[in-house]
Amino acid sequence: MDSAPDASKPLLAAVRQQIGMLPNLMKVVGHSPAALEGYLALNGALAKGQLDAPLRERLALGVAEFNGCDYCLSAHTYFGRHGAKLAQGELDAARDFHAGEPRADAALRFARRVAETQGRVSDADLASLRAAGFDDAGVIEIVANVALNVLTNYINNVTLTDIDFPKLATRQAA
């Protein structure tokens, strides 16, 4: 943190205080105060939205697996287990965009379609999601969570961020 730009230091300190550690991803993103501020703002805003923490962690796991991001897979497995209290079976299923709960499963299947089609989902994809109880805000929040996770996946894949969580490998890396 000592070598971080001055504008990033208070943001990084807040992350450390909030979660009790400073993940290497935050150190990497902290090279750009603008990127760090933007990431933290969107992440914080989405945490106040309709999607609960377990669903957001499941979405992060599916997107990490899809994009071959070992860092995010490792981090979100840790946060999914310890923060969102997801069972191992749910963590494993989320990597394939599935969940045992029908509503979460619909959200994950939709997120997969968003990732696969770069957002060009079909009317049927939207209808399935809406049938599971998601309104317009829910649709947008799922897309925003996918995009937020794509951002961190790409940063980690570009920078080869050192994994500071119990290490897992995506199937692409295995």
Image (cartoon, rainbow, N blue to C red):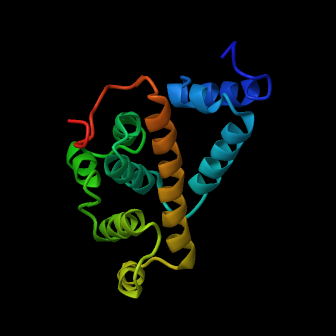
Residue 24 point in image, percent of width and height:
51, 25
User: How many numbered marks does the figure carry?
Assistant: 0
Residue 165's x, y, as percent?
Answer: 38, 26
Viewer-proximal residue among 76 and 146: 146
Residue furthest top in the image: 2
Q: Is residue 104 above or below residue 88?
A: below
**Residue 18 in picture, x, y percent from top left:** 60, 31
Is residue 141 found left or right of 87 in the rendered image? Answer: right
Residue reaching furthest to the right = 6
Say above or below: 15 vs 153.
Answer: above
In the rendered image, the vertical position of residue 31 relative to residue 152, given as above or below: above
| Residue 23 visible in this rendered orientation of the protein | no
14 or 12, which is in the foreground?
Answer: 12
Where, quadrant-wise, is the C terminus in this rendering? Answer: top left
Residue placed farthest to the front in the image? 158
In the picture, the quarter occupied by the N terminus is: top right
In the rendered image, which quarter is residue 172 located in? top left
Task: Give the side of residue 11 with respect to residue 105, left or right.
Answer: right
Residue in front for this viewpoint, 154 or 62: 154
Question: Quick check: can you spot residue 71?
Answer: yes
Residue 5 vertical position relative to residue 112 in the rendered view, above or below:
above
On the image, the x and y values in percent for residue 149 come to 48, 49
Question: Which residue is nearer to you in this view: 136 or 100?
Answer: 136
Q: Residue at x 34, y 39 (%)?
A: 77
Q: Quadrant of residue 96?
A: bottom left
Query: In the image, what residue occupies the spot 27% across and 47% down?
Result: 91
Q: Residue at x 63, y 48 (%)?
A: 44
- Give the residue displayed 38% in from the left and 52% down from the top: 63
